[in-house]
Image (tube, rainbow, N blue to C red):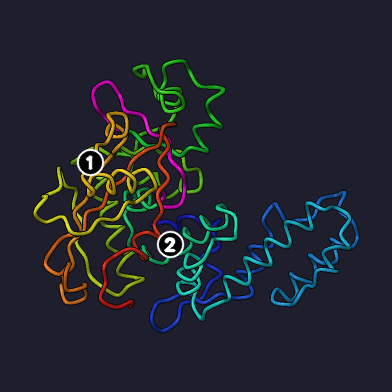
Amino acid sequence: MADYWPGCGWQFLRSDADGQLVVTDDFLRHLLQRPELAPLPESCAAERALHQELLAQPRQAVGTARLAALADPDAADNYAVWLRFRERLLARPTLEGSYLQLFQRDVDVPPLLVHQLTQVLLRQVLGEDATPFQARAAELLFRPQRIAVQGDGQVMAADEETVESQALAATPGSLVDLLRQAGATPREAELDVLGEANAGQYWERSEAHDLVVQLNHGQPALAALCEVIERWIGHFLGVRVRVEVAREIDEDQWVWHVGLDAQATAVLNALYRGEDVDEAQGRRMLCLFRLEFADPHVLRPEVAGHPVWLAMAMDEGQRLRLKPQNLLLNLPLARQS
């Protein structure tokens, strides 16, 4: 298996004895190379000097006066964001701990950086034995997807950024066009659909994010997403769970649920309260999952012995934006691991 997602910077981190990630100076240097911070030809001398000094000592303190001295106010703002992100990364001994703490307050760093952090952590979670379907399914947790429901009922998910970048050159009625604005049956696909025959190509294309996956029941990508969720929870919370696709919620077993995104959370909350859900909301629901704990004693007494129901849904623009932190903060554990 080739390496995957090399651009996320996982290789610059260090694992501790428990398999948790520790932030290194090299990882901070990697973040400093992001295009938002890399000096441009027209950058002032003060900005260039600051960048060089941070590359040399990426943990050094930088005062507000130093940022105010930069000629470009946008550059000063970008450095202020990076410094706040650095503070969040170093808040706890491990990256996992800092990630959890990030969501225990109002998140004050851009989604782009949160997504990169999620990707790095998923790279650690999946390790070297990931399958192509698991790696592609994991992308759903840190890259927004565009969803297309085809005439035959197939539910296709493609990377939103990739769809937008290819949309101008897309053939009318193609899969790219369908993913961008929905409606027609595709005649040809500029984006390849990941399947058993081409799964091995994922490794060399992992940075391109150009493989579509099918999210219908019985498809390998959906089964792989269940496995990714199991490993994500196990890595962070130290508990073993089993996640399976479900057809419907058993009302007698419904005592707890977690939405994997804002849309699904709203629908599940409404249904649990006995409220009506309009037809459009119902159509946007993509999948329901049943999560069970191997050891019921790790749960709150009122939930022990019952499954936790999970769901994901697309929004009105047919976008899927999962929030993997919901799986870490909203499960009914008797204690935080």
Tag 2, which secondary structure?
helix
Q: Residue furthest bottom?
A: 17
Which disc, if any, is residue 219? 1
Tag 1, which secondary structure?
loop
Vertical order, 131 against 160 (above or below): below
Quadrant containing the C terminus is bottom left
Vertical order, 32 against 14 (above or below): above
Vertical order, 66 against 34 (above or below): below
**For mark 2, does the 10 Å Cα neighbourhood hold few (<14), some (14 to 19), or many (20 or more) residues?**
many
> What count of labels does the image hold?
2
Tell which circle, 2 or 1, labels the residue nearer the N-terminal end.
Answer: 2
Q: Where residue 301 sits: x, y (%)?
A: 17, 74
Q: Where residue 202 sits: x, y (%)?
A: 40, 46
Q: Nearer the viewer, residue 59 or 276?
A: 276
Q: Where residue 159 sits: x, y (%)?
A: 45, 39
Residue sitting at x 75%, y 77%: 61
Tell me the amino acid under the disc marked 1. Gln
Q: Is residue 278 left or right of residue 81?
A: left
Image quadrant assignment for residue 152 = top left
What residue is shown with label 2?
123
Q: Is residue 108 left or right of residue 239?
A: right
Label 2 – label 1 distance at C-alpha: 23 Å
Q: Which residues are magenta?
A: 139-155
Q: Where residue 182 sits: x, y (%)?
A: 40, 23
Q: Residue furthest left?
A: 252
**For mark 1, does the 10 Å Cα neighbourhood hold few (<14), some (14 to 19), or many (20 or more) residues?**
few
Whether residue 117 is in magenta: the answer is: no
Image quadrant assignment for residue 232 = bottom left
Quadrant containing the N terminus is bottom left
Q: Is residue 207 left or right of residue 148?
A: right
Residue sitting at x 41%, y 16%: 173
Tell me the amino acid under the disc marked 2. Arg
